[in-house]
Amino acid sequence: MRPVARFVLFAGFLACLAAPLAHAIEKQPAAVYHARRAALGGKLLGGVAVLFAAEEPLLDFMPYRQDEDFYYLTGWDEPGAALLVVGDSSASAINSTMYPEAGHKYEEILFLPTRNFRMEKYTGAKMDASTPSVAQRTGVDEVRPMTDLPKMLNDLIAADRRVAGRIWTQAGNATATGLMQLAATELGTASLPAPHDLADLTTELRVVKDPGEIALLQKASDSSMAAQRVMMRAVRPGVTEATVAGQMYAAWLEYGCERDSYAPIVGSGINSTTLHYAANSRVMQDGDIVVVDAACEYSMYAADITRTVPVSGHFTPRQREIYDVVLGAQKAAIDSFVAGKSKIGDRYLTDPDSLDLASYNYINTHGKSLDGKPLGKYWIHPVGHMVGIDVHDPSIYPAVLKPGMVFTIEPGVYIPEEKIGVRIECTFLVGADGKLIDLTADLPHTADEVEAFMKGK
């Protein structure tokens, strides 16, 4: 391959790597991230994992958010980096004859891009591989220049061609695709086997939270509850949905959160019956009910909370009836919970251990539509999902709920013809003893509690 062509190909591989942009967030000790990388290495069966940091936004007013798996494994919150984890290929390490000879030992390397000194006048000084004590400061065993990554991968595959079939990376990542194409070119082949999806391995690692993650999730919940209280005092006739969302944003920032967990939903009147309504453009009217599904992230960890409140400060009899049905459905799920047995995400409502089924059965046997039919037809979404670095943290559903898992229970009933939508969402941790811990327990919950708080009591 001619030098110019090689340069152009590698330039394309690096095109997605942007200058770093720092965020001050609360991180766990370096040993925690190292243990996660080592756990990933144990799943690679002698292969390698290559991850890339999220790209920097195209526009400077767009916030930067790190790739979830990259952050989980490194705690690194800047764009332009890559991580290589090499699994031990010795037979003793993988308990297999797949690699009978001792090939390579476990390694972990963080690759940092070339510094842009002109840009650093705007963004501040950044680290690169030559920064003193850079490995200690990043917490990764070894730090190299980004330009070393293609050669490192090439050398691993050249030493044992079987490695080419045991590469894990982020599915759909353009930079990873460029790296694989470059590696194939350097090795003199048209292509390499398609890499495995890294999420197949990291999903299993991320689903159970460690104590540090639980503490951050509680801080995210505390800040989100503070904003929900602001909302309850701000809702009144004549106020726009966007005004309420804006006051919640201000509260999140005041309590140290860096961003919302998702686009806030402030849906009043007919908008309360649209599950992911996010226009927030309507002026709230006397007699409306309003669904407020809004929460924030604290140091990359998400909260997820929904409360439904009356715009006038008190529920109509019909609104309260539907509210109490939804609240009862949530309680039915809580009461049926058994650690290691109960599940969420039962899409077809067929599993007797499903919290979805417990909630649905309650809704379908309590209350009626205006034409006297069961309310089950107004149930339109699963009862919950995992929560973590993502507000919808990865899992394989239906998911069996075990100690250390954090998830929502959020039944809802949405009746467009009555302009009544009610969703009540709390976030729970399965404690070490198998009992549920409500991370949002301090927020008004029942209809009476909501009304009393809105009246300043």
Image: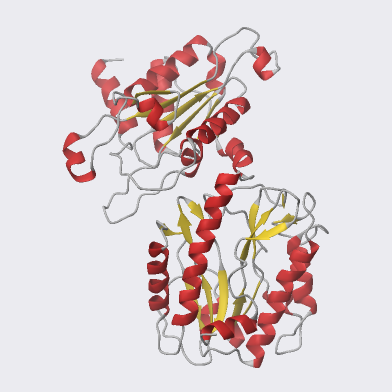
Seen in the picture, residue 236 relative to 231 is either above or below; the reply is below
Q: Residue furthest top?
A: 101
Q: Where is residue 307 in the image (x, y as percent from the top left)?
A: 57, 74
State the image quarter where residue 349 is shown: bottom right
Image quadrant holding the C terminus, namely: bottom right
Q: How is the image coloured?
A: secondary structure
Q: In this view, does 23 lie to the left or right of 42?
A: left
Seen in the picture, residue 257 relative to 141 is either above or below; the reply is below
Identify the residue at horizontal 62%, vertical 7% (top origin).
101
Would residue 346 be visible to someone looking at this image? no
Would residue 69 be visible to someone looking at this image? yes
Q: Residue furthest front?
A: 457
State the image quarter where residue 337 is shown: bottom right
Identify the residue at horizontal 68%, vertical 14% (top origin).
92
Q: Where is residue 76 in the image (x, y as percent from the top left)?
A: 41, 38
Q: Where is residue 333 in the image (x, y as percent from the top left)?
A: 75, 65
- Between residues 135 and 405, which one lies in front from this camera angle? 135
Q: Position of residue 258 (x, y in %)?
A: 40, 56
Image quadrant holding the N terminus, namely: top left
Seen in the picture, residue 424 relative to 189 is either above or below; the reply is below
- Count of marks, rendered view: 0
Q: Is residue 437 left or right of residue 212?
A: right
State the image quarter where residue 206 is shown: top right
